[in-house]
Image (cartoon, rainbow, N blue to C red):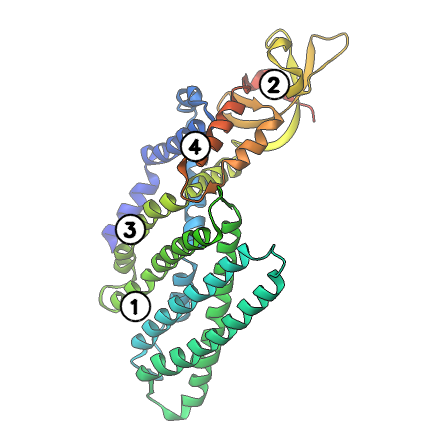
Amino acid sequence: MRIYKKIIKLILKSSLFVSFLALIANWFYLNKIGWLSLFLSSMASKDSLFIIAFFLTISFFSMALIFLLPSINIIMFLNKDDEYILKYNEVRMSYTKIFFIIATFSNLFFILSVFFNDGPYSFYINISLILLVISYGWYLYVRGVKKIVSQDLSFKQPSKAKWKEIEIYVIIPFVFLLTLTLYSFSFYMVTNGVKSNGESVWIQVLYLFSVFELTIFISVVPCFVYFSEVNKKGWLSTIITISPVLILFVFIIPIFVPSIPSLVINATMKFSGVMDENPHVYLVDENSYPEKLFNLDLWNKRILNDSNKYTIDGVSMYSFGETNLVCPKSIIIPYKNSLSNYIYDNKEDGKTSDELKKSAQSCIPFDKKALKIVG
């Protein structure tokens, strides 16, 4: 265990590792907006690199926590050995199986509701889906908890059996239901960002359902590994055992949902202050940046009377080191479109990326000292 702690501390203290993370984020973002020419200048500011690396780590683990919410909740709630129940580890494993089965079915309801909420019979369809979920959910509860869990359920102290049965059959399923609701709602929000290129409803449903199945499977795998290994190896060794699953998850999910890396980098750049998509009014010196550089239709340029200065409206898409890349406000729409992804259609994703780079061609890299925000 001491060796693991030393390795973790060494990684966290390594300035080379921190710089590497930050440069990856910088390269990915600048390549996305078509301004890789600014990449070399980003290597000079070490303090800013540390800030970017810090928020990249926070954004990455926040995204991972969202996807691993089921495992985290189950492990935390069922972590301690119960002094009243025999074969408690088998009971925990059974709950993990039941959670996966119910999650699969409930997510199908969320996906179907996404595609049938605008039709003329949407109300009746959604009511039918809700009744179907309630009926099948009750069936899974009776057949699952009452049968799968009960076959391993035996008490050391029969006098405590009544209260433990309430916990096993009511409290724990209720907590898991809340977790599943939050998890499914998060996935529902993600599905709203997925765009179609004319595919049929059923193809879209199949695509989203497959992505969720892969996601929920990977999110529940740590539970099985943890409960089967923690008693043998300890929690730190178990976490190291689970790590390959997380690494596999990181590489597989973006294949189906390409916008995930962009969302992580977007959060990193926003939180670190590198990007600010809120429009501002900038005061520019004519001697440093001639006003003919700015198209009036794009920049809303206003020349000040009796002065060699003028103002422009824009957004700061990349403020790093001594450089502030200011773009027209019109870039906000193609940038937000680039954070969405089309259903298994890399060509459409490529089009949104090209539109963003085309819009970014109008951006101007300013020296921060020569630029002043006045509104």
Which kind of residue does numbered mark 1 sit on? Answer: Phe
* Residue at numbered disc 2: 371
Dot placed on the residue nearer the N-terminal end, 1 or 4: 1
Dot placed on the residue nearer the N-terminal end, 1 or 3: 3
The answer, for residue 276, to whether it is visible in the render is no
The answer, for residue 23, to whether it is visible in the render is yes
Front label number (1 vs 4): 4
Using residue 14 as the reference point, say whether residue 196 is left or right of it. right
Q: What is the quadrant of the C terminus in the image?
A: top right
* Residue at numbered disc 4: 350
Circles 1, 4 touching at the beta carbon (< 8 Å): no
Picture disc at residue 5: 3
Q: Secondary structure at mark 4?
A: helix
Image coordinates for residue 102, horizontal then vertical, percent: 42, 69
Q: Residue at x 43, y 85 (%)?
A: 165
Q: CA distance from mark 4 to mark 2?
A: 33 Å
Dot placed on the residue nearer the N-terminal end, 4 or 2: 4
Indicate the quadrant where residue 24 lies: top left
Circles 4, 2 touching at the beta carbon (< 8 Å): no
Which kind of residue does numbered mark 2 sit on? Answer: Leu
Crowd tier of the residue under label 3, counting other residues whose Cα lies within 10 Å: few below 14, some 14–19, many 20 or above: few
Indicate the quadrant where residue 345 lies: top left
Q: Residue at x 32, y 51 (%)?
A: 246
